[in-house]
């Protein structure tokens, strides 16, 4: 008897067949040693098109909306029908007694197989191959640990729910708004909220009116300091705090220069003294390991790569070269089982990093910051495998592989320790006491930064303090950080060497880069101070690590967004669409709720039927608003407090009524 194995791609099928000994080639399959290994080419089967479900839905007409299929028939994709027929024939062979699902171990991989299996009408028992690496050892171990496919029914429900929700939202709302606006528009459950964030930023930039102002800076030398640059420091004039004890901000002066001139003259003739010296030590631990989104962010910042480009290169390192683990992961931790393989992994890669490794790298056990079974989802973080790199890597593949290796090796290093000193210098004159702030940062311990491609800190010199990209006019770099003279202390007098007024202009918010947009998608637009996002936040993001790159590319392909260097800008077409759609269609928070429900569904919390009831209620509500010619919050909608986001009446209640069991502790 024979076991059929269905892989997601031909290349993966060949790797599996090689390990199993299935070496005899036939059309669309490899056979031998009791196995027949065949493959999909991505999706072979999809949900049927509207006209295939109901002939009345072929014509685009607002009166036929919403389209709510009572059942969900499947349709074989014509472009890959030939391979589907091969797989179907294999599944129905008389000598095939069972099936192994070997598609990618994740939600979309599960959907690809389940749709093929259902469309083929197969009823044979299925076991699941679940692996995070395509090395021969990983494949062999995976086949020794095959699990009953029914263990993954919850994941399959989440996959079907995602597919059906996207169909309902995409098919209904794209038609509704195309008919309403008289233009060909595409609306998507995740696509449109993502576009909305880019549009909101673009509108803020277009509405921004720059303002000129002046800042006063003074140069001091403390008592007893040596002559020359090492004995000088610069300070920026501070404003009076809005509240007693509140933060002191750099003072902005009118651009005509009259007030700034008075201040510079009195400072030049005043007496200076250091009134406050404070120091703060900051310990920065090694960064967490990569998940796909963090890898895409880092490659965008370093190399200017798009998210899709990074995914493509990572996929090649995983599939073709077997050099990294499964890249489409949302975990930044390792399981204890995987951690036990790290000595072998480090031995494979350490040769390229001699002189940069901490003592005990690969030998000392990593702590819970990196190894935590409770934080590993379908797959662990991206790490190198025990396969040695050959000379066949492209320059891009080498760059990305180097990033993954460096991130793992950094985990054994000590913290980066920085000490920031802030100095307040007061200049007293007959007219006033003017306060100037100066700041300097020194690296006391390089730690893991020695492996960071951004430099080890000490070689980069002083760094400017930056604020977030969306702060607009208040986001100027204060440029205070500098190398301060030694021996600065409270009470020490200083001499004013110079004072000047500098012209400044307020700046608009920065456009999204793919790195910052990926973060916004991951947090569903919420502002997050910490770089390491909580698991709960990830559950409510827009899309998944595996789909975010494609969403960005779709927005560009449909001409809603354009690339401008490293930045992303909304087009007039994108702005028009976002301005026309109902607030809930573009709500990142609401879409994040649906994503969270899908995540819970994949864990067996809740059920598919209740999830779909909520989506259907949402679609009915929004389509009804379009049919009524009302794109604003109407009946059933109330504002959650002044200026808060609108709450969707029936649809949101349907969502909230899907009471899932509590999460396991």
Image: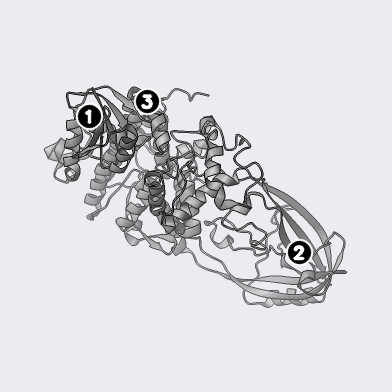
- Quarter of the N terminus within the rendering: top left
Of helix, strand and loop, which one carries label 3? Answer: loop
User: Given contact means CB atoms under 8 Å apart, are the residues at marks 2 and 1 in contact?
Assistant: no
Q: Depth check: 228 or 659 in front?
A: 228
Q: Is residue 519 visible?
A: no
Q: Depth check: 270 or 604 in front?
A: 604
Disc number placed over residue 409 in the picture, else none: none
Distance Cα–Cα, label 1 vs label 3? 21 Å
* Label 3: how many Cα within 10 Å (few below 14, some 14–19, many 20+): some
Name the quadrant containing residue 433: bottom right
Disc number placed over residue 118 in the picture, else none: 1
Front: mark 1 or 3: 3
Q: Which residue ends up furthest to the left in the rendered image? A: 55
Q: Is residue 477 visible?
A: yes
Q: Which residue is mark 3?
A: 146
Of helix, strand and loop, which one carries label 2? Answer: loop
User: Given contact means CB atoms under 8 Å apart, are the residues at marks 1 and 3 in contact?
Assistant: no
Q: Which residue is mark 2?
A: 484
Residue 564, position as x, y percentages in the image: 41, 64
Front: mark 2 or 3: 3
Mark 2 vs 3, N-terminal side: 3
Q: Depth check: 250 or 597 in front?
A: 597
Q: Is residue 234 above or below residue 521?
A: below
Residue for point 24% across, 51% down: 178
* Label 1: how many Cα within 10 Å (few below 14, some 14–19, many 20+): few
Distance Cα–Cα, label 2 vs label 3? 62 Å
């Amino acid at each position: 008897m024979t076991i059929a194995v269905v892989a997601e791609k031909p290349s993966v099928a060949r790797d599996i067949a090689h390990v199993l000994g299935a070496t005899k080639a036939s059309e669309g399959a490899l056979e031998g040693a009791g196995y027949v290994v065949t493959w999909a080419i991505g999706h072979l089967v999809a949900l049927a098109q509207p006209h295939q479900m109901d002939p009345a839905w072929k014509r685009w007409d607002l009166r036929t909306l919403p389209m709510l299929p009572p059942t969900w028939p499947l349709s074989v994709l014509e472009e890959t029908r030939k391979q589907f027929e091969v797989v179907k024939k294999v599944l129905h062979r008389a000598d095939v007694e069972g099936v192994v699902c070997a598609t990618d171990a994740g939600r979309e991989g599960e959907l690809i197989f389940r749709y093929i299996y259902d469309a083929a009408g197969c009823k044979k028992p299925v076991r699941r191959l679940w692996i995070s690496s395509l090395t021969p050892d990983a494949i062999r171990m995976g086949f020794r640990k095959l699990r009953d496919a029914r263990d993954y029914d919850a994941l399959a429900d989440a996959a079907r729910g995602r597919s059906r929700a996207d169909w309902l939202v995409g098919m209904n709302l794209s038609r509704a708004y195309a008919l309403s606006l008289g233009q060909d528009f595409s609306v998507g459950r995740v696509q449109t909220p993502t576009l909305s964030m880019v549009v909101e930023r673009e509108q803020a930039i277009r509405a921004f009116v720059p303002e000129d102002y002046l800042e006063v800076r003074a140069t001091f030398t403390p008592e007893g300091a040596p002559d020359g640059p090492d004995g000088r420091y610069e300070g920026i004039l501070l404003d009076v705090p809005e509240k007693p004890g509140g933060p002191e901000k750099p003072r902005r002066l009118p651009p005509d220069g009259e007030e700034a001139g008075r201040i510079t003259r009195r400072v030049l003739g005043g007496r200076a003294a250091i009134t406050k010296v404070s120091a703060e030590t900051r310990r920065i631990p090694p960064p967490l390991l990569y998940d796909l989104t963090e890898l895409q962010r880092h490659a965008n910042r370093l190399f200017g790569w798009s998210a899709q480009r990074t995914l493509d290169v990572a996929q090649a390192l995983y599939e073709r070269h077997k050099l990294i683990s499964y890249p489409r992961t949302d975990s930044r931790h390792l399981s204890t089982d995987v951690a036990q393989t790290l000595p072998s992994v480090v031995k494979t890669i350490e040769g390229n990093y001699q002189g940069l490794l901490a003592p005990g790298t690969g030998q000392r056990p990593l702590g819970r910051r990196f190894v935590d079974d409770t934080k590993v989802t379908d797959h662990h973080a991206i790490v190198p495998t025990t396969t040695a790199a050959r000379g066949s890597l492209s320059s891009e593949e080498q760059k990305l592989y180097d990033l993954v290796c460096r991130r793992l090796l950094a985990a054994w290093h000590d913290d980066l320790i920085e000490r920031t000193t802030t100095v307040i210098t007061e200049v007293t004159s007959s007219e006033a006491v003017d306060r100037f702030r100066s700041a300097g940062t020194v690296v006391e311990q390089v730690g893991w930064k020695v492996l960071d491609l951004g430099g080890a800190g000490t070689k980069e010199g002083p760094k400017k303090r930056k604020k977030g990209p969306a702060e607009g006019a208040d986001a100027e770099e204060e440029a205070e950080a500098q190398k301060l003279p030694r021996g600065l202390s409270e009470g020490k007098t200083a001499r004013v060497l110079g004072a000047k007024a500098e012209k400044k202009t307020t700046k608009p918010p920065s456009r999204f880069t793919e790195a910052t947009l990926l973060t916004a998608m991951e947090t569903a637009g919420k502002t997050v101070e910490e770089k390491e996002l909580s698991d709960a936040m990830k559950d409510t993001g827009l899309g998944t690590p595996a789909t975010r790159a494609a969403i960005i590319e779709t927005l560009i392909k449909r001409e809603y967004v354009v690339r401008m260097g490293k930045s992303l800008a909304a087009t007039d077409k994108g702005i028009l669409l976002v301005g026309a759609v109902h607030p809930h269609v573009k709500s990142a928070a609401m879409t994040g709720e649906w994503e969270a429900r899908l995540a819970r569904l994949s864990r067996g919390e809740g059920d598919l039927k209740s999830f779909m009831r909520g989506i259907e209620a949402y679609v009915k509500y929004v389509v009804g608003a379009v049919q009524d010619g009302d794109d604003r919050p109407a009946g059933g909608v109330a504002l959650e407090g002044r200026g808060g986001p609108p709450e969707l009446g029936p649809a949101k209640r349907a969502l909230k009524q899907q009471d899932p069991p509590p999460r396991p502790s």
